[in-house]
Amino acid sequence: MTANNIQPLEPIAPWVELRTDSHDWAAADPKLLDSMLTSMVLIRAFEEKVLELAGQGLVHGPAHSAIGQEGGATGSVLAMRASDQVNGSHRAHHQFLAKALHYVAPEGLASSAPFDGEVRTIADRALSEILGLARGYCKGRGGSMHLRWAESGNLGTNAIVGGGVPGAAGAAWAHKRAGTGDVAFTYFGDGAVNIGSVLETMNLAAAWKLPLCFFIENNRYAVSTAVEEATAETRLSSRGLAFGIPAWKVDGMDPLAVYLATQEAVRTMRAGQGPAIIEADVYRYFHQNGPLPGSAFGYRSKDEEKMWRERDPIDRVASEMAARQLIGDDQVAALRARAKALMEEVAAELIEEHDGSRRIVPALWPSPDFRDFGVRGDLTEFSGARFAEQEDFAGEIVESRFVDVVAQVMERRMQTDERIVVMGEDVHRLKGGTNGATRGLSDAFPDRVLGTPIAENAFVGLAGGIAMDGRYVPVVEFMYPDFMWVAADQVFNQIGKARHMFGGDSEMPLVLRTKVAMGTGYGSQHSMDPAGIFATSVGWRIVAASTPFDYVGLMNSALRCKDPVLVLEHVDLYNAKGPAPVGDLDYCIPLGKAKLLRSGDHVTVLTYLAMVRPVLEAVERLGLDADVIDLRSLDRVGIDWETIERSIAKTGNVLIVEQGSIGTSYGGWLAAEIQDRCFDMLDQPVRRVHGGEASPSISKVLEAAACAGAEEIEAGLRSVMADQGRALA
């Protein structure tokens, strides 16, 4: 090999280090520096009070302080406008406060002004939230790690390391789509840089040119693991090179350097050039959690801590202002004293002396009755909706392929609602995705049907961010339901919990479509029925239609709903024909309404999705006197107990029929609920038909053995009849 055969490669995006000098400080607006200093002093006083209360045992849960890191938060936020948005991780008091303060004082804080009005309210509500009190921003639900004040641009901080990054991309997508020029910032630490959801989101944001800044607070330690132990390339802003994202590396203890870098990053994003990365080298003075330094736990030295404290960002700004005769030592001391006094006053309203010790004022706690408020919404959004069932439908009904109706109703909704956007792998190709379920949509709505990279964490999390933004309604397709495990954090920790976690008022209008593919030979990792997993998880609604007519009504309801809704489909139904409406695709079927398909007196059969038809066929073939109920809504609050209990009171016997594995069974928890609620009505224990323990295999024979089918249905029916003394011939 000769030298001529080796060509150096250059990244497509710049990567620079930005530093300030005396000229930069001399040119800085005095009002900017005064606001910067005031904001940092307020944040420091707040954090010190939190640590003091934590040391007294008054903070229930963690107290992840960012004392020492104020320069990164304040320097970046002051380069934003009020309508820009941010989110952060578990250590985010400083970012939350910086954004909130900048929102109420967009022209800047003055070091000589009193800390009253909105500034005092921010301190009160933020501290109340950290203490778990009802007057907090999330009504005490979020505590230290889950802080949200949407009005101020605080999207919500996050306890899952890197977990909030995809959601911030959703906010950035909404800004780009709306054409506002606004940008989003997502703050995270060195511990999150190597997490898949972060890297996936970097790739997606770059590919789609989203106005999102990945702000890396490199404080050198993920709990106690040094950055050198976690990665070979400790200059973490280098991650941008792989994705074509311009990156700036700055000294985070120099707030002006952060401000100048952020100005450059914001200029890039507002110009439509896509995302940016800022890495700020900062240092948390205390341990991961609580009021002790890291040296107390042996992973840092006192000399190291002393060296970083000598570079304190507050002292740096104060000294530079003093050098320009903008402030004096007495004024700085007075500013610190007033900030400390503010926090003393705020805390005094929340804490009292009782029997010789300090405690939270009892009247400030949330009521225990508030426990489940906001897990889901109250469905008031269905006021004025038109509901219809096949039996009373006034329009024409014909036999149609199920999958064609799936595409037709989505096209209709996208015609009538410009907020709807569809995304997923290959949904824009192959004449309607891998099964034709999005046929025609990309031609009709090319800017609203988004083919994604193979990155479930990123694109479903991005969809969650879009939903929380509220301006658009995302419809996400998982090609196979097993892929939910890849994106489990976004599906369950983020989307499913967001409304409740942030106080119960933030809506999450998102639809997740996926198909059960048992019987297709796709094996163990593409064939699960996810109903049981979602039904036992917080926040999700679940619908499963067994006919094209029901699919139209249930999908319309899913899109109208302000909660996340899982829409289950089945490959066995796609090419099957069933009753479908002609011309009228605008009706809804109520969430939480099952359908009695056949009446009888001897047994209640509960089933859903692709098992409905074989159950009906088996009941007819065996000549059973049975109620057959298509559940349709499968989530905990969506179970139609009125219909089910009416049937059980009549029959005294129950058989639950599902296709999938016993290990992730939907019928298991449903049977337990029925036993609890209807014990006195039952003549025998609830019986079940389900698949085996093993996941379906590629082998046709083993796959059939793993999944419940006609043979298992008949055996279950015979068993439940025999146990009531009505054995079938």
Image (cartoon, rainbow, N blue to C red):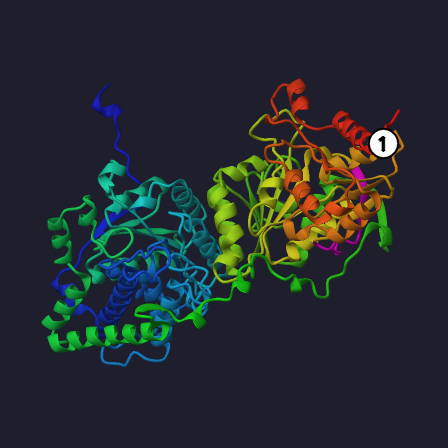
Q: Which residue is the site of mark 1?
A: 725
Picture quarter with the N terminus: top left
Q: Which SS type dominates the magenta stretch?
A: loop
The spot of residue 225 in percent (x, y) is 25, 41
86, 685: nearer the viewer: 685
Query: Where does the magenta region start and end?
Result: 577-591
Picture quarter with the C terminus: top right
Answer with left or right where residue 179 lies relative to residue 419.
left
The spot of residue 309 in percent (x, y) is 15, 57
The spot of residue 451 in percent (x, y) is 54, 42
Q: Is residue 230 above or below residue 678?
A: above
User: What residue is drawn where x is 76% and y is 25%?
Assistant: 711
Specify whether residue 569 is in view: yes
Q: Is residue 710 magenta?
A: no
The spot of residue 104 in percent (x, y) is 37, 74
For the residue marked with disc 1, what is the amino acid? Gly
Q: Is residue 129 above or below residue 640?
A: below
Q: Is residue 589 magenta?
A: yes
Bin the neighbour count of mark 1 within 10 Å (Cα to Cα): few under 14, some 14-19, many 20 and up.
few
User: What residue is drawn where x is 52% and y is 63%?
Assistant: 368
40, 207: nearer the viewer: 40
Q: Secondary structure at mark 1?
A: loop
User: What residue is drawn where x is 22% and y is 20%?
Assistant: 2
Quadrant of res 524:
top right
Quadrant of res 88:
bottom left
